[in-house]
Structure formats: structure tokens, C-alpha cells
Image: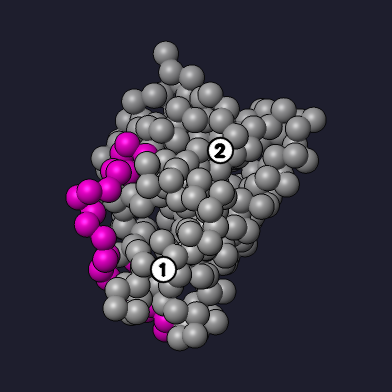
Amino acid sequence: MSFLTDKVVVVTGGSDGIGRALVDALVPMGAKIATCARNYDKLYNLQLQYPNVLLHTMACDVSVESDCKRFIDSVLADFGHIDILINNAGISMRSLFSDVDVEVMKKVMDVNFFGAVYCTKYALPSIIESKGTILGISSIAGYRGLPGRSGYSASKFALQGWLEALRTELIPDGVHVMWASPGFTASNIRNAALNEKGQLQGESPLDEGKLMTAEECAKHILKAIEHKKRTLVLTANGKLGVFMNKFFPSWSDKLMYNHFFKNQKLIK
């Protein structure tokens, strides 16, 4: 029997990437799963794949507070309570700050930060009652600002700072709060990254075949929840990046510049 058997687990952004891998990993563990995404068709296909599983889905844009409330209310109506909330929904961006439309940065912040805030706010009373877990999917960009990803980095710094404050506030309630930083992972988030005008870039500059898979990432995240880790940093490059930025910040600046710029041009 898994530690997740009969636990109610909510995963935002469960139609693609790490979110979808988390849903797939939770199914054989016997969890009661609830997930949301903006794409109704992908959620419908997910339901078709798991017809005999306790799986609750709803189309939801996490950047809209009323959508988040409606989703969390529907989960509570179906399952009665929430044990674990995984704030996974997110978008990325690739553009120099000098070129980007500020509305793009606002959109990234609305999804990556406020989406987690909204869902957590409405799920919190139930999670406190169950002494459950709140987890945010962050990034190495939450430890080290990445050039050309300033809005994305800002959203992840905000997410981690907020979760750290929340973790401290909830100590008396016995609620476990943590964040996981996958590093570069093979997922759809880069293909769906926004350019300076807020349009989908539709391609990734990275060799996805050399990256950690979303499935492996999901396995590590669920294990970290089970063992109540404070934080989780995945991939060797991710751990090295966090270490370098903490102890050798100036050197880290140069390494990051050389990594993201070729011939003084940003790799998007």
C-alpha cells in the first residue's frame, strides 16, 4: 500500500509535462486525483485514459481567481477534503527585458505566482484540517535569475519567498510546505514559452533528449512529499547552479552569460 492510497491529491496544470506525469504516477498509487488545465480536450482525453479511477477534472485558468475558487470548491464537493495540493501550472518566457512587453511579465506572474496563491487560499482550510501538504513547482530560476527569462525568474523567486513565509506561518498547524525545483526537464513548458510580444515561441533551444524526463521528475517529487523534504533541487546541473550562485556569485554571472548568449546574442 502506498502512502498516497486514498489521499486526495490536487495537481494544477495536469494535462501536460510534469503535471501530467504526476497524474500518471498517482494513479497506480491509489490516490484520489483532481486536476485542472486550460485545455478541455486534453482533460477529456485524460478521463478517457483512466475511466475506472477516482479522477476529477475541470477546465480552469489559474490566473483567474474565480476559476481557482470554482475548481477547489468542486474538488471539495466531490472528495470532501484535500490532503495534498501541488501547484504545478506554469508558463515561461524568453526575451530580453529591454524588448519585452510588460504585459507578458504580468501574465507570467499571474499564472506562476498568483495561480498558486489563489488555489492555496481556497484549499487552505481543508489542508489545515487534514494536516496535509502544499507544494509549489518552482525552478532553478527561483534561486538564480536567468537572462532572457527575467519575468519567469521573478515569478519563481516570488513563489519560493511566499512558500517559505507560508511554511513558517503553518508550523503550529502541522502543514508541510515545500517547493521542488526541477532544473531543465523535458516538458512542454519551453515549447509553450512566450516571446517578447506574448506569442507562443513553439520551439525549444535545448536538446530535450538529454534532459531529465517529466516522469522521473514526478517520481522524485512524490518521494520528497512522502519524506517531507523542505526543498528539492533536481538534476546535477541544477544543484551545481544553486551552489555556484550561493558561493561564487560573480563567477556564476559570467557562466550564465556564456551559457545563454552566443556571439553576444540571447539564445531563445
Q: Nearer the viewer, residue 150 or 57?
A: 150
Residue found at x 57% / y 50%: 246
The residue positioned farthest toward the top in the image shown? 1
Q: Nearer the viewer, residue 210 or 17?
A: 210
Q: Is residue 77 left or right of residue 165?
A: left
Give the quarter of the figure containing the N terminus.
Answer: top left
Residue 253 in picture, x, y percent from top left: 48, 64
Disc 2 target residue = 231
Q: Is any atom of residue 60 visible in this view?
A: no
Q: Which residues are magenta?
A: 192-217
Query: Where 237 sits versus 128, above or below?
Result: below
Residue type at mark 2?
A: Thr
Residue 241 in picture, x, y percent from top left: 45, 50
Give the quarter of the figure containing the C terminus.
Answer: bottom left
Q: Verify whether residue 44 appears in magenta.
A: no
Disc 1 target residue = 257
Q: Nearer the viewer, residue 4 or 240?
A: 240
Give the distance between the C-alpha atoms of the residues marked 2 and 1, in whole angstroms: 26 Å
Query: Where 123 sits versus 68, above or below?
Result: above
Q: Is residue 192 left or right of residue 170?
A: left
Rendering colour mode: one colour
